[in-house]
Image (spheres, rainbow, N blue to C red):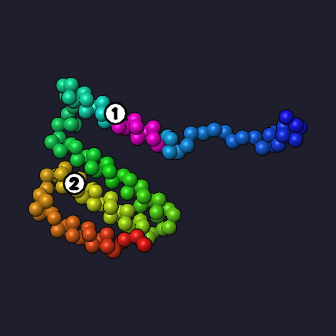
Amino acid sequence: MSSVDEKTKLENPAPPVTPSKTASSGWMMGLVVVAIGGLLLAKNLGVDLFFLDFHNWWAFFILFAAVGPLHLAYRSYKREGIGMAMFNALVTAGTIIFIAMIFLLGLSFGTWWPAFIIIGGLYMMTGRQ
């Protein structure tokens, strides 16, 4: 190695290696999924978990799906401010939350189906270009 290479290396040291944001969020999501699976397995093996006695507990998984669109709405707001992309993501999150609440609260689709027409209109109004 020449002295020029050594001098450049000393002047411009390599940045410290840090885990990427996506890698740490992947670990966190994986840990959540493992914990949920462990709780469900424990319930199947006879462990009494009072919070899983709720008859529509599985609808919380639908509710969890709203996290992605809510995060997208936040990112759109930070990037562009209030705009159609943010509203579109909020309509998506609201739709997912609405469907989950129908199951969680035991509401009748026969009563609430017109809300889906309203949601369709909101999608038309906030459609992305």
Who's the residue at 84% across and 37% down the image? 6
Location of residue 28 by image quarter: top left
Location of residue 87 by image quarter: bottom left
Question: Circle 1 sits on which residue?
Answer: 35
Considering the numbered disc 1 on the image, is that residue within a helix, a strand or a loop?
Answer: helix
Question: Start and end of the magenta stretch?
Answer: 25-35
Rendering coords of residue 94 (x, y %): 30, 60
Mark 2 residue type = Met
Considering the numbered disc 2 on the image, is that residue within a helix, a strand or a loop?
Answer: helix
* 85 relative to 42, above or below: below
**Magenta segment, prevailing SS (helix, strand or loop):** helix
Rendering coords of residue 3 (x, y %): 89, 37
**Sequence-wise, which precedes: disc 2 or disc 1?**
1
Location of residue 9 by image quarter: top right
Who's the residue at 78% across and 44% down the image? 12
In terms of depth relative to the viewer, which is nearer, 123 or 64?
123
The residue sitting at the right extreme is: 3
Rendering coords of residue 77 (x, y %): 46, 64
94 sits to left or right of 11: left
**Quadrant that contains the N terminus:** top right
**Quadrant that contains the C terminus:** bottom left
In terms of depth relative to the viewer, which is nearer, 2 or 127?
2
Who's the residue at 11% across and 58% down the image? 108
The circle on residue 101 is: 2
Q: CA distance from mark 2 to mark 1?
A: 23 Å
The circle on residue 104 is: none
Magenta stretch encompasses residue 8: no
Rendering coords of residue 50 (x, y %): 20, 34
Magenta stretch encompasses residue 27: yes
Who's the residue at 41% across and 61% down the image? 73
115 sits to left or right of 24: left
